[in-house]
Amino acid sequence: MAKVTLNGSERTQMPGAQPVGPANPRETLEVSMIVRRGDRTALQTRVAKLAAGNRSIGFMSREDFASQHGADPADLSTVRKFAAANGLSVVEANAARRTVVLSGTVEQFSDAFSVQMQQFAHPSGTYRGRTGAILLPQELDGVIEAVMGLDNRPQAKPHFRVRSKDNGKNQQAKPTTPVSYNPTQVASLYGFPSGTGAGQCVAIIELGGGYRTADLVAYFAGLGVGSPKVTAISVDHGKNAPTGDVNGPDGEVMLDIEMIGSIAPAANIAVYFAPNTDAGFLDAVTSAIHDATNRPSVISISWGGPESAWTAQAMTAMDDAFQAAAAMGITVCVASGDSGSSDGVNDGKDHVDFPASSPYALACGGTRLHANKTAITSEVVWNDGANGGASGGGISSFFPTPGWQMGKKAAHRGGKAIALTKRGVPDVAGDADPETGYNVRIDGTDTVIGGTSAVAPLWAGLIARVNQTNGSPAGYLNPMLYSKPQALRDIISGNNGDFLAAKGWDACTGLGTPNGPALPGAI
């Protein structure tokens, strides 16, 4: 039977990886198939109006969105028939998320999609992978937009940095004496509006690690704020699983919860745990967006990777999920990365981090913040130099320039500002330097953490407060912020490698850091 290529599904092996043999044909795995959307044109029209700053159309309820823009039952039936014909089991079929999860063996999936799966050795470990494109039977051509999960390489990394304990050995490399803040102090310095986040739910996406309730209770008690309600939600068999390693993924999980819980202690915090694969990441995001029980109004994501590490189908599927969030009035805050203008890719070129580079994400960059007890005394781009971290930012190689960024230029070390021909990253910023980082508690240890991982939950907590203050969700707020830059404090000093801070938008800190008093009225 003739088959067709699934556009955007081409995979290459991870840099530095080597094939060591075929994957175990009897290994069981689960694969997520993303079905086309119902009435896509109507959704695109709605989202285009929101992108133009038109709020009069309002936001859709999850129920209305599912009925109007979910998967067509006939398409789900077609996938079920495909599964049966290939000996695959249907684990889940969710019309709102447009996702069908199938279970089978490596051999069955290899035959079904005409792929060859191998085991690869990589400096970070081994993974099951594939190269080349996925092939679909003709009856699924146009019905299926992505097939994810065949490859279980680690898709993303957390963007946090624990302050190094060098006992002063490296002080010459540090521009200032290290300081640290509680999240509530930074919120006050930025002038966040008063509030507790009451009535809001903030979702957090986690791809590993976990939290211990005793640590959260002790941390919030130490700050003198009430403990938020925290709920762990399993996606694709992911779970709250603390590793006990302060420098591991627990650092991300605890940082996210403690940042948001400090700023919005009365908010409900829903933590979606999923495997660190492209399928797990997307499934966690769509589960949060379409969660009709917890109903988050804000999503915080502090995981990502360079665009070059993603397939086109995965980036398109995630971007489409963020468009759904925009239509439903859900704000998606994403860390822009901790490796400056290279995003950690050692090819001498500039790269940006995804999913921060989606035009429907609020991409969050980083600064170095110094203050006295009541006011900010200096704030510049976070850049610790060649051996440290720096605010992720630059120009996408995949996503077109959104209307609200038209005419913007990125100041560059080459001396010539680069006009944006693609999406520019980030949009906003906040304190991220570990040397001016946040006091947190991880696995029973009090420590100081920075990174843009802290900025996404900082903004998520802020938006929870704004939503409470305004009595309505901020939703997709990028167009509003770009039209009202007075809601941000412009950062004009520093660089993240190849890009320079400048007046107005730049590819280091975006429009700037929060000007709290002006934000509720601006969005």
Image (spheres, rainbow, N blue to C red):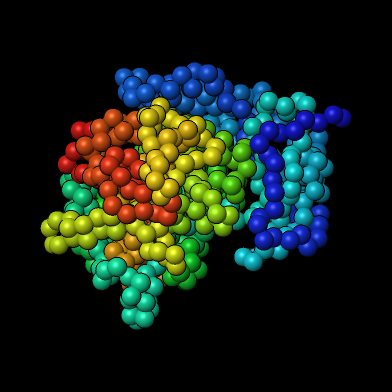
Front residue of 431/240: it is 431
- Hey, which residue is sitting farthest front in the picture? 415
**Residue at left 39%, top 29%?**
406
Q: Residue 138 appears in which quarter of the rendering?
A: top right
Front residue of 266/9: it is 9
**Residue at left 43%, top 70%?**
246
Where 508 falls versus 85 (above or below)? below
Front residue of 18/413: it is 413
**Residue at left 30%, top 45%?**
502
- Hey, which residue is sitting farthest right in the picture? 1
For the N terminus, the image quarter is top right
Q: Residue 485 appears in which quarter of the rendering?
A: top left
For the C terminus, the image quarter is top left
Q: Is residue 350 visible?
A: yes
Describe residue 386's horizontal placement relative to residue 112 as left or right.
Answer: left
Spot occupied by residue 267 in the image (x, y as percentages of width and height):
30, 47
Q: Is residue 431 visible?
A: no
Where 65 falls versus 493 (above or below)? above
Spot occupied by residue 26 in the image (x, y as percentages of width and height):
80, 55
Q: How many marks?
A: 0
